Image (cartoon, grey):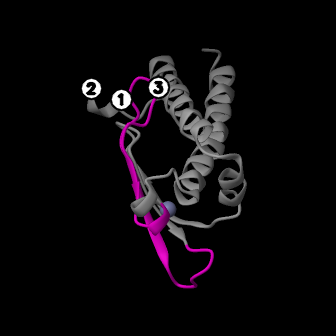
Amino acid sequence: MSRFKNHITPELIEGRKSALVERGKAHRVLQAVACERRLGRAVGLDVTKARESAATGALWASVASESNEGISYVVEMDAPRDGRIRSFSCSCRDHRDRGVVCKHMLAVSVRFCDQKLIEYKLLTDVEKMFGF
Ligand SMILES: [Zn+2]
């Protein structure tokens, strides 16, 4: 069994693709509730570190402050469930004091969607290559 664990199978690809679709939907819901202006400002922010749980889709990331050089904010998002990210936090004042979906969270969310779109396309290519 263990010697086959790294083999690419149609089930493995299908599972990964559906996980990506579910997580992508949850991030789009998060982005939809944010105001347009904040979403625009999020795109230019630098996500310096990010970790995703492959099993659950929970995210931890560090985002550089725009106004304070050398300062980073920590963004955490729980595993998406039922098409939503139910719990998220950022260490910035905007989120802590006002409870808004801040630009740092949006930066992480937008980056996540961009990267996962690339991964999804790669998986589709692999499917075609192996004729799954
Ligand atoms: Zn923030």
Q: Amino acid at mark 3?
A: Gly
Foreground label between 3 and 1: 3
Callout 1: few (<14), some (14-19), or many (20+) C-alpha neighbours within 10 Å?
A: few
Sequence order check, earlier mark of 3 and 1? 1
Residue 63 percent location from the top left of the image: 52, 66
Q: Give the residues in magenta.
A: 65-94
- Residue beneath disc 2: 1
**Quarter of the rendering occupied by the N terminus:** top left
Q: Residue at x 69, y 60 (%)?
A: 41
Spatial CA span between label 1 and label 2: 6 Å
Q: Residue at x 45, y 68 (%)?
A: 93
Viewer-closest of 92 and 47: 92
Viewer-closest of 62 and 104: 104
Callout 2: few (<14), some (14-19), or many (20+) C-alpha neighbours within 10 Å?
A: few
- Residue beneath disc 1: 4
Whether 76 is among the magenta residues is yes
Left or right of residue 84, residue 127 in this image = right
Sequence order check, earlier mark of 2 and 3? 2
Q: Residue at x 40, y 66 (%)?
A: 91
Residue 24 percent location from the top left of the image: 56, 33
- Residue beneath disc 3: 83
**Quarter of the rendering occupied by the C terminus:** top right
Residue furthest top in the image: 132
